[in-house]
Amino acid sequence: QVQLVESGGRLVQAGGSLRLSCAASGRTLSGYIMAWFRQAPGKEREQLAGIGWNRGSIWYGDSVKGRFTISRDIAKNTLYLQMDSLKAEDTAVYYCAGTLVGESEWRYWGQGTQVTVSS
């Protein structure tokens, strides 16, 4: 069982930066794929970026490519999302999720952290 806790969300002005963290406990994330999602009011959940924990393979969604950076600290068992050049449309609740390599659904989810970007 893995517990995920996000932090770092807050109110920020457009053009600013934030770094979100997702601390994992319960077991090491070795063998997992981790990802960041977000959901804005009235919109579907959107996958932003993902990373393979062991090899560090990374992918990004088109809406955040070039502005957001996903990374991990293996020793701390923590996932990060660096968000730069924030826009008002980035306002959403941000979630981290994890699943074992080969699984078809995201098994573990955090509770979410609110990011609000003022224009």
Image: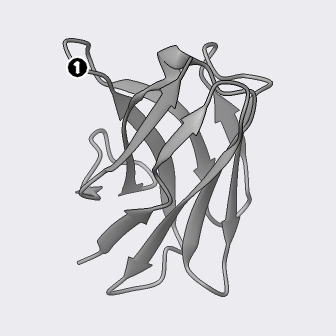
On-image quarter of the N terminus: bottom left
Q: Residue at x 38, y 86 (%)?
A: 27
Q: How is the image coloured?
A: one colour
Which residue is at the front of the view, 100 or 73? 73
Whether residue 56 sits left or right of residue 19 in the image: it is right
Which residue is at the front of the view, 22 or 31? 22
Residue 31 percent coordinates (x, y): 52, 68
| Residue extending furthest toward the left | 42
Residue 53 percent coordinates (x, y): 61, 63
Whether residue 31 sits left or right of residue 94 in the image: it is right
Which residue is at the front of the view, 24 or 21? 21
Q: Which residue is mark 1?
A: 41
Q: Residue at x 52, y 25 (%)?
A: 118
Task: Name above or below for residue 7 compared with residue 44.
Answer: below
On-image quarter of the C terminus: top right
Q: Please, what is the three-letter code of the amino acid marked with disc 1?
A: Pro
* Mark 1 residue element: loop
Residue 17 percent coordinates (x, y): 71, 42
Task: Name above or below for residue 101 compared with residue 28.
Answer: above
Counting the numbered discs, the total is 1
Whether residue 44 sits left or right of residue 6 in the image: it is left
- Quadrant of res 65: top right
Whether residue 50 sits left or right of residue 1 in the image: it is right
Q: Residue at x 33, y 47 (%)?
A: 103
| Residue extending furthest toward the right | 66
Q: Residue at x 26, y 16 (%)?
A: 44
Mark 1 is surrounded, within 10 Å at the Cα level, by few (under 14), some (14 to 19) or many (20 or more) other residues, namely: few
